[in-house]
Image: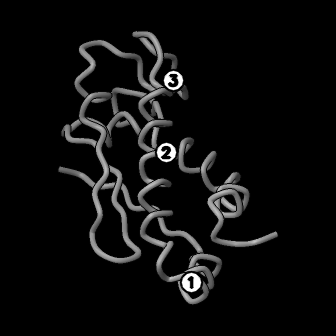
Amino acid sequence: MAELKITVDTSIMDRVIRETPGQVDALLDSLAETLKNDIVLSFGESPSAPGEPPGVDTGTLRASMTWESQGTGRRVVRDGVEYGVHLEFGHENVAPRPFVGPAFERMRVKLADYVRDFGVIKP
């Protein structure tokens, strides 16, 4: 199965871990669940237009979205189908229908507010 990896600047999260180690895993669990739900809710009607999230045909991709803890400070959000990466990035016969990248970007934009609201960083 192909894998999409997104690398992020973790300097803010590193500070949060140092300052409030007991809350980090709960925060990451919440972030992973929120990201997974955002992805699931982004799917539209089938057929989808290029550049838009995939449309729901059978619902298999949407239903396969999960997240799991891979230890302290690490959560993985993934789909459970072979073709998810082809929809995300497209291939020779299909234009991209991104669904992970846009959800991740929406999360990134709101991350500081989310962390503050979670109570990890005080204003």
Q: Residue at x 51, y 17 (%)?
A: 49
Q: CA distance from mark 2 to mark 1?
A: 20 Å
Q: Which residue is mark 2?
A: 34
Q: Position of residue 99 (x, y in %)?
A: 47, 36
Is 42 above or below relative to 120? above
Instruction: Specify few, some or many for label 2: CA neighbours under 10 Å numbering under 14, 14-19, or 20 or more.
Output: some
* Quadrant in which residue 117 is drawn: bottom right
Instruction: Specify few, some or many for label 3: CA neighbours under 10 Å numbering under 14, 14-19, or 20 or more.
Output: some
Which disc, if any, is residue 103?
A: none
Element class at badge 2: helix
Q: Earlier in the sequence, mark 1 or mark 3?
A: 1
Q: Which residue is mark 3?
A: 50
Question: Type of residue at label 1?
Answer: Asp
Question: Type of residue at label 3?
Answer: Pro
Residue situated in front as seen by the camera: 61 or 73 = 73
Q: Position of residue 25 (x, y in %)?
A: 42, 69
Q: Earlier in the sequence, mark 2 or mark 1?
A: 1
Is 115 placed left or right of 26 in the picture? right
Question: Type of residue at label 2?
Answer: Thr
Element class at badge 3: loop
Is 4 placed left or right of 2 in the picture? right
Q: Position of residue 50 (x, y in %)?
A: 51, 23
Q: Residue at x 30, y 39 (%)?
A: 65
Q: Are marks 2 and 1 in contact (CB under 8 Å)?
A: no
Q: Position of residue 100 (x, y in %)?
A: 46, 43
Q: Which residue is mark 1?
A: 14
